[in-house]
Image (cartoon, coloured by chain):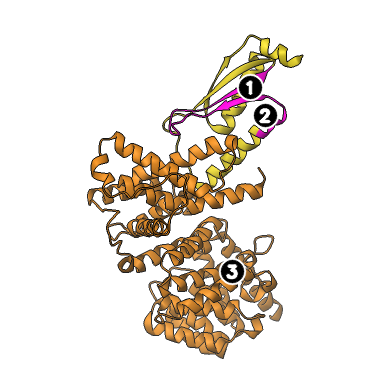
Chain colours: A yellow, B orange
Amino acid sequence: MNEFLLLGTRPPTSGETSPARAAHDMAAVTAWHRWLRRWGLLRAFSLPQDRAAELRACLIVWASGPAAAQRLGVGWGRVTGYQVTVLPLLDGSAGKERER
Amino acid sequence: MSEEAEAALAAIFRTEWPRLVGAALRIVGDLQTAEDIVQETLLAAVDRWPLLGVPERPGAWLLTVCRNRARNLVRDTGRAQQRTLSLRPLLAGQAPADGEVREIADDQLRLIAMCCHPLLPTDAQVALTLRMVAGLTTEEIARGFHQGAATIAQRLVRAKRTLKEHRVAFADDDPDVAGRLPSILDVIYLVFNEGYLATTGGQLTRGDLAAEGHRLACLLTELTPDQPETWALRALLSFQLSRWDTRTSADGVLLTLDAQDRSRWNRELIDDGVHALARARNGERGPLLLQAELACCHATVPAFAATDWGAILALYDELQAIQDTPVVALNRAVAVAMASGPAAALPLLDKLTGDPALRHGHRVWAVRADLHHRLGDGVAALADYARALDLVSNDVERRYLADARQRAADQYRSRA
């Protein structure tokens, strides 16, 4: 397993939202995060101090390889509406340690 | 997150939305900017709460984020000096003090008053209230009114521009709510009715709009507890909404009062209506109070047969004396038919079918068709049903009228 950094950014103009839509979105995002935690794939997360910054959240996730990490990125982007950038963090060493 | 949790979250966001818009507007002074800030606040919650958990006091969290964002924006645009003078010290993350609670309530009231500003046409007042106070998106409003999203978007943009051009200030000391109350009540009633008596389309009711109208009426009573008229509106809408689930059958057929299952009427809403009506009776006997009294007559009797049509007719007489409109006259004619028989009401209906405000709608013809039918005049009944069917635009009502006409036709055919 390798560590990957997922950077979620939201474009400045992301359309209108309403209370009902926000609640619905949050339910979807919460369910996705719960799934990520249940499978032990979430190593850490970080949120920017400026709540209105374009960068909205960062996740450090475990994935078997770049393709799996990309799939996680796509899933995260789908539920959050973020544009997700996926970057490899370590070259497998942390994963090996974890496997031991 | 379960559906229940999502609904609870939506309820929190709905409750907080007008508070947030009011708070942001107080700081930035511009409706569009305030709306953007509130959206940004909700998005911040969507970003953070799934990872950090829902805060213990979500409303306070949202309000703090919203105000901070608004203040940052004002500061960033170099207007801090002139604005901060009017700001009270706001402590991040702390429970609002009594004075602040009052300020939040005042802000919401100012917001409603601003959305119902006399400079704006009624349709713009309705759209702006739904967007800024109820938090509905342009698309949701458009869907509710069966209009294009671009039309509603233009209406909103024009309304905001008008308010801006006329420098309609938000944080005045006197929000002139009392002076603007009639138009505020009108707007809320219009929102409710558009949902409750959908004029076009395949559904008789559009739940979201009616629920929003009722919610706004409740909010208004919380903000102006000393205004009997707001209680009258709340009572009226609570009684009407209590029958919501029983107005159509499972297969979408319209059910009139006599055919509805009263055991399924919402008791909580009826109790709320009774309570609100008691508060409303402290004021003048205006049109809203009388309509609420009428709705109460229907909502609080256990069976259709027990309806006190004499009392209902007396209330319609009173209502007609102060609001002599064709619609009131039509409803009164129905009460006459129920209290004294169809023959007594027919002359009233004959007169009303000539009224320019009614003759192009289906209701007057549908009522007269029913009276003719009850009097055994098949030819006249079928002619009026045909006329009503030509004019009706709601699919559920069309189906009801078509069934009624068919039943009448079968009956006369079998007699012949």
Label 2 sits on what residue type? Leu
Instruction: Write the residue at 57% across / 61% down.
Output: B204
Q: Which residue is mark 3?
A: B269
* CA separation in Å, label 1 and label 2: 9 Å
- Of all chains, the one bearing label 2 is A
Instruction: Write the residue at 53% across / 44% down.
Output: A21
**Residue B384 versus residue B331: which sits nearer the camera?**
B331
Q: Secondary structure at mark 1?
A: strand
Q: Which residue is mark 1?
A: A61
- For label 2, count other residues whose C-alpha is less than 10 Å away and answer few (under 14), some (14-19) or many (20+): some
- Of all chains, the one bearing label 3 is B
Q: Which residue is mark 2?
A: A36
* CA separation in Å, label 1 and label 3: 49 Å
**Residue B406 versus residue B101: which sits nearer the camera?**
B101
Circles 1 and 2: CB atoms closer than 8 Å = yes
Label 3 sits on what residue type? Leu
* CA separation in Å, label 2 and label 3: 42 Å
Res B194 seen here: no
Q: Secondary structure at mark 3?
A: helix
Label 1 sits on what residue type? Val
Residue stretch in magenta: A34-63
Q: Is residue B98 left or right of residue A35?
A: left
Q: Position of residue B88 (x, y in %)?
A: 33, 50
User: In the rendered image of this protein, does residue B86 appear above or below residue B412?
Assistant: above
Q: Secondary structure at mark 2?
A: helix
Mark 2 on the same chain as mark 3: no
- Which of discs 2 and 3 lies nearer the camera? The answer is 2
